[in-house]
């Protein structure tokens, strides 16, 4: 996320304050049942090398939080803003007895319903057009279909036993693994195979909690196919 001068005033403060403003409004509604907040897996996966799990198949679960030090050192302002916003939301919810559930998705891919392309959809469009520069720096991340994220929100709201955080990711791939899969699905698209090395340790996300709600994650081929078909109708 580009920053003109001050990441605190431009990104972090607006994200945190915006989240808390919504929760303050929710507090005023006596009929409120539950609040479901959208977070991001960037609040989970950005860790110092020694903080990654070395057992349980290198699984990151809902108990993990990204390293504030690593985010600041690498000027990763969006993940830092999302992490601070979610943590403040949990504090506010506890103090005000709000039943809060957070959905924590990876890189969301799928059809675009808005009349305008989102930043993510624009990035995917560039990717399909052969401009892979936006994807290469992402390194190893989790991908998830937008339908599965929506489903997790609904189930997180409707299921009385839902609680806490829910990680949403179908698979974790680095750039080379992603292009290898998509080259089979889209053989006519010249995905760049050259990419900088990924230094992030191999890890996975434990999404068993979301699966327990009833979320059945679609594969990466399906999410990018649906995104491609949606974009084709617009261009």
Image (spheres, rainbow, N blue to C red):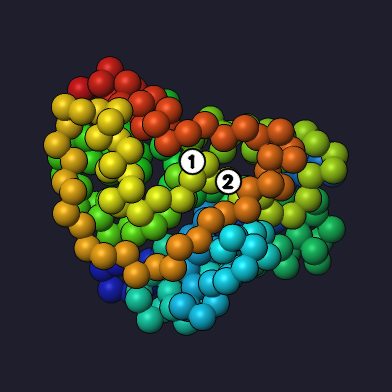
Residue at disc 2, secondary structure:
strand
Image quadrant in which the C terminus is located: top left
**Which sits in the foreground, 170 or 104?**
170
Residue at 85%, 43% in the rendered image: 161
Specify the quadrant of the image occupied by residue 131.
top left
Check contact, mark 2 vs mark 1: CB within 8 A.
yes
Left or right of 123, for residue 18: right
Give the Cα separation between the discs numbered 2 and 1: 7 Å
* Residue 1, position as x, y percentages in the image: 33, 60
* Residue 18, position as x, y percentages in the image: 55, 57
Asked whether residue 29 appears in the rendered view, the answer is no
* Residue 231, position as x, y percentages in the image: 29, 25
**Which sits in the foreground, 119 or 173?**
173
Residue at 28%, 31% in the rendered image: 184
Residue at disc 1, secondary structure:
strand
**Which sits in the foreground, 235 or 6?**
235
Left or right of 232, for residue 70: right
Please, is residue 22 above or below residue 190 in the view? below
Please, is residue 48 above or below residue 123 in the view? below
Asked whether residue 206 appears in the rendered view, the answer is yes
**Which sits in the foreground, 75 or 185?**
185
Give whichever of discs 2 and 1 has the lower sequence position: 1
Specify the quadrant of the image occupied by residue 2.
bottom left
What is the number of the mark on residue 144? Answer: 1
What is the number of the mark on residue 116? Answer: none
**Mark 2 lies on residue:** 168
* Residue 33, position as x, y percentages in the image: 81, 41
Residue at 54%, 72% in the rendered image: 52
Residue at 58%, 46% in the rendered image: 168
Left or right of 234, for residue 61: right
Specify the quadrant of the image occupied by residue 224.
top left
**For mark 2, does the 10 Å Cα neighbourhood hold few (<14), some (14 to 19), or many (20 or more) residues?**
many
């Amino acid at each position: 996320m580009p920053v003109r001068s001050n990441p605190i005033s431009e990104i972090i403060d607006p994200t945190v304050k915006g989240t808390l403003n919504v929760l303050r409004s929710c507090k005023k509604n006596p009929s409120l049942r539950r609040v479901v907040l959208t977070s991001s897996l960037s609040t989970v996966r950005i860790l110092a090398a020694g903080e990654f799990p070395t057992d349980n198949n290198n699984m990151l679960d809902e108990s993990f939080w990204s390293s504030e030090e690593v985010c600041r050192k690498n000027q990763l302002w969006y993940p830092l803003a999302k992490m601070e916003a979610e943590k403040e939301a949990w504090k506010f919810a506890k103090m005000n007895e709000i039943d809060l559930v957070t959905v924590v998705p990876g890189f969301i891919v799928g059809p675009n319903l808005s009349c305008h392309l989102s930043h993510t959809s624009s990035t995917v469009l560039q990717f399909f057009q052969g401009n892979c520069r936006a994807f290469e720096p992402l390194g190893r991340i989790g991908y998830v279909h937008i339908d599965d994220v929506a489903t997790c929100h609904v189930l997180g709201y409707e299921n009385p036993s839902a609680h806490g955080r829910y990680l949403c990711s179908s698979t974790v791939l680095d750039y080379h693994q992603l292009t290898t899969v998509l080259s089979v699905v889209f053989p006519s698209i010249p995905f760049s195979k050259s990419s900088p090395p990924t230094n992030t340790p191999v890890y996975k996300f434990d999404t068993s909690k979301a699966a327990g709600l009833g979320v059945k994650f679609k594969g990466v081929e399906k999410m990018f196919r649906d995104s491609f078909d949606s974009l084709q109708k617009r261009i």
